[in-house]
Amino acid sequence: MKKLLFALPLFAAVPLLAQMPKEVPGKADPARVTAGTYAVEPTHTLIGWTVNHFGFNDYFGVFGSPTGTLKLDPAKPDTSSVSIDIPVNELFTANAKQLEHLKSAAFFDVGRFATAKFVSTSVTVDGSTAKIVGTLTLKGITRPVTLDAKFTGAGTNPFSKKETIGFSATAAIKRSDWAITYLLPIVGDDVKLNISVAFEKTA
């Protein structure tokens, strides 16, 4: 009986496995991208940050579960626009005590500012890369930010059956520009952002 119960999940997975594609569904092929409106796929989108700690080493954390919208037309890529809401209160690090400190008023103050927002103001495309100029609103302060973005793949998600496109992006900002000044300068002012985002087509 125990063996049968153990095997049941495996039997349930057989139909799903049979539907899996024989090759990776996403490819870095711009011809696969179609015009329309896309929504952030939050399960597989991450926004990471890195800051130097006391001059000894780099410390990093991740924001997950963002939401947002991308509008694009491959025939007119420079007319693209993107808007992403970042749930700052969904910040993750590997240490619970440090995470509590980062969420406090000393740093992100998530009790008052639970969400940050990036909104593009211009997009300049060069092949599979783009410069996305926009504004980042964090802790109620809005400042300009430029993202260096790269197209990483497009195709149909085998689970959702939706057209999906992916990008990576990097940026460099100063935390003091958003009034996050605790322990400056022994904890670095310069922050590196590393973004990996997937979008699913909605219209």
Image (cartoon, rainbow, N blue to C red):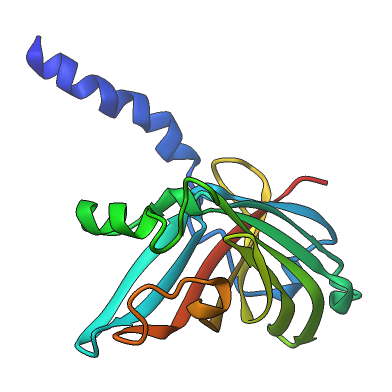
Please state which of residues 100 and 79 is positioned toward the viewer in this rendering.
Answer: 100
Residue placed farthest to the left in the image? 2
Q: Position of residue 122 (x, y in %)?
A: 82, 78
The reply, left or right, for residue 30 in relation to residue 169 is: right
Q: Residue at x 83, y 70 (%)?
A: 80
Residue placed farthest to the top in the image? 1
Please state which of residues 185 and 60 is positioned toward the viewer in this rendering.
Answer: 185
Q: Residue at x 81, y 67 (%)?
A: 81
Q: Residue at x 90, y 74 (%)?
A: 75
Occupied quadrant, residue 129: bottom right
The reply, left or right, for residue 195 in relation to residue 12 is: right
Occupied quadrant, residue 183: bottom left
Location of residue 200 with respect to 165 vertically, above or below: above
Occupied quadrant, residue 103: bottom left
The reply, left or right, for residue 10 in relation to residue 190 is: left
Q: Position of residue 127 (x, y in %)?
A: 73, 87
Please state which of residues 115 and 181 is positioned toward the viewer in this rendering.
Answer: 181
Q: Position of residue 73 (x, y in %)?
A: 87, 67
Q: Quadrant of the N terminus?
A: top left
